[in-house]
Amino acid sequence: MTETYNITGMGCAHCKATVEKAIAALKGCENVKVNLEKGTAEVTGCVPRAEIEKAVTLAGFTLAR
Ligand SMILES: [Cu+2]
């Protein structure tokens, strides 16, 4: 299962890496691909949206609706 999430607040490759790392550490996450230009994160695996939101928020970014 792959879900795409919109993330706001990422400005550079470092932000991208931070978000990728935060999501990759989540239980059930098999793969994560962050697109800096589009502001999206493509998450493969079984991770509840609430967990993604928590990780993204803790990393300092915002999960958009
Ligand atoms: Cu940055």
Image (spheres, grey):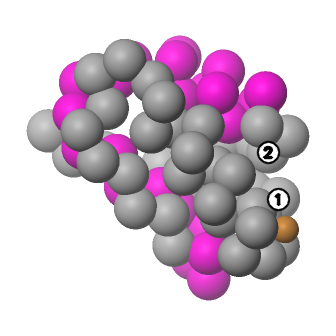
Q: Is residue 48 visible?
A: yes
Q: Earlier in the sequence, mark 2 or mark 1?
A: 1
Few, some or many residues within 10 Å of mark 1 (<14, 14–19, 20+): some
Circle 1: residue type? Gly
Out of 27 and 47, give the one closest to the viewer.
27
What residue do we see at 78% from left, 76% from top?
12
What residue do we see at 76% from left, 67% from top?
14
What residue do we see at 82% from left, 73% from top?
11
* Pointer 2 with pointer 1, Cβ within 8 A: yes
Out of 58 and 1, give the one closest to the viewer.
58
The answer to whether residue 55 is above or below residue 35 is above
Circle 2: residue type? Phe
Q: Which residue is mark 1?
A: 9
The answer to whether residue 34 is above or below residue 47 is below
| Mark 1 lies within 8 Å of ligand 1 (Cβ measured) | no
Q: Position of residue 24 (x, y in %)?
A: 45, 39
| Residue 46 belongs to magenta span | yes
Q: CA distance from mark 2 to mark 1?
A: 5 Å
Q: Which residue is mark 2?
A: 61
- Span shown in magenta: 36-58
Indicate the quadrant where residue 54 lies. top right
Q: Position of residue 26 (x, y in %)?
A: 45, 24
Q: Position of residue 28 (x, y in %)?
A: 28, 22
Q: What kind of element bears circle 2?
A: loop
What residue do we see at 62% from left, 82% from top?
37
Few, some or many residues within 10 Å of mark 2 (<14, 14–19, 20+): some
Specify whether 58 is left or right of 34.
Answer: right
Specify whether 40 is left or right of 60.
Answer: left
Q: Is residue 64 visible?
A: no
